[in-house]
Image (cartoon, rainbow, N blue to C red):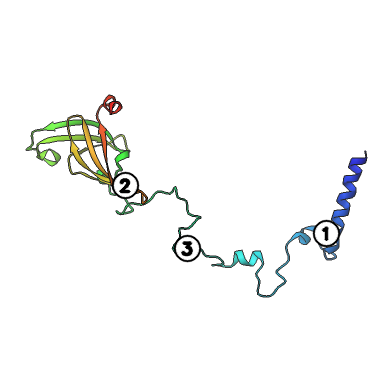
Amino acid sequence: MKRPLLVALALAALSAPLLAQAPQGSSPKEAASPAPASEPGKLGLEEFVETPGGYSYNPQGRRDPFVSLLRPVQAGGPKTRKPGMEGFLIQEVALKGIVRTPGGGMGVAAKPGFIALFAGPDPTKSYFATTGQRMFDGVITAVDSNSVTFLQEVTDPLSPVKTREVKKNLYASEEARQ
């Protein structure tokens, strides 16, 4: 019985100074709103936030601490991807088959050697490629009877290596051995 009475008295004692500061005839909501800055030349919070260009970060050669380090770094190439194999990342394509051609055909079958069959991000389409085929982040350097080797451009600005070799095997059991 004494505890609720003490809490009620404490609340009444604390709210009395707040009610005394409110102008007569005003509601408690109006009394709770912050008053404008009383000092000339200083902006209140509302004026500072609503002022266009109220704050701008000046890095002076340092990185912006508010920009995420996890965002992807754009390659030096174009920002929009081309259609077909030239617009695919190496990690987006899956090696589905390899064919050997004697040459004398048309297109990629014009020269003798191996032709790789890839499935792109859209599984309903297939793409043929051979050595020298450009991709968005690399180039095919070698195609043999059971694997395709890529030279991938590394886009990490902190990495000392600028390119790395990526190999995609036709059979998953061979990938586990390496």
Quadrant in the picture for residue 176: top left
Q: Secondary structure at mark 1?
A: helix
Give how far across and how far down residue 51 sits, in percent. 58, 68
Of the numbered discs in the image, which one, if any, rests on residue 59? 3
Left or right, 49 with reference to 162: right
Callout 1–callout 2 Cβ contact below 8 Å: no
Which quarter shows the N terminus? top right
User: Looking at numbered disc 3 in the image, what kind of residue is underneath it?
Assistant: Pro
From this view, report whether residue 49 is shown above or below residue 103: below
Q: Nearer the viewer, mark 3 or mark 1?
A: 3
Q: Quadrant of residue 50?
A: bottom right
Q: Which residue is mark 2?
A: 154
Residue that badge 1 annotates: 18
- The image shows residue 53, relative to residue 153, as above or below, that is below
Quadrant of the rendered structure where residue 118 is?
A: top left
Q: Position of residue 87 (x, y in %)?
A: 28, 46
Give the residue at the far top of this rendering: 173
Q: Of marks 1 and 2, which one's residue comes earlier in the chain?
A: 1
Q: In the rendered view, does 30 fall on the left or right side of 157? A: right
Counting residues from the start of the chain, the first of labels 2 and 3 encountered is: 3
Task: Kindly give the residue lying farthest to the bottom in the view shown.
Answer: 40
At horizontal 45% and vertical 58% (from top left) the residue drawn is 63
Q: Depth-wise, is mark 1 or mark 2 nearer the camera?
A: 2
Residue occupying the point 85% across, 59% down: 17
Q: In terms of depth relative to the viewer, which is nearer, 78 or 147?
A: 147
Residue 103: % across, % down: 8, 36
Q: Residues within 10 Å of mark 3 (few under 14, many from 20)?
A: few
Q: Residues within 10 Å of mark 1 (few under 14, many from 20)?
A: few
Residue 43 numbered tag: none
The location of residue 151, given as percent across then percent down, is: 24, 43
- Tell me the quarter of the image containing the C terminus: top left
Cα–Cα span, label 2 and label 3: 27 Å
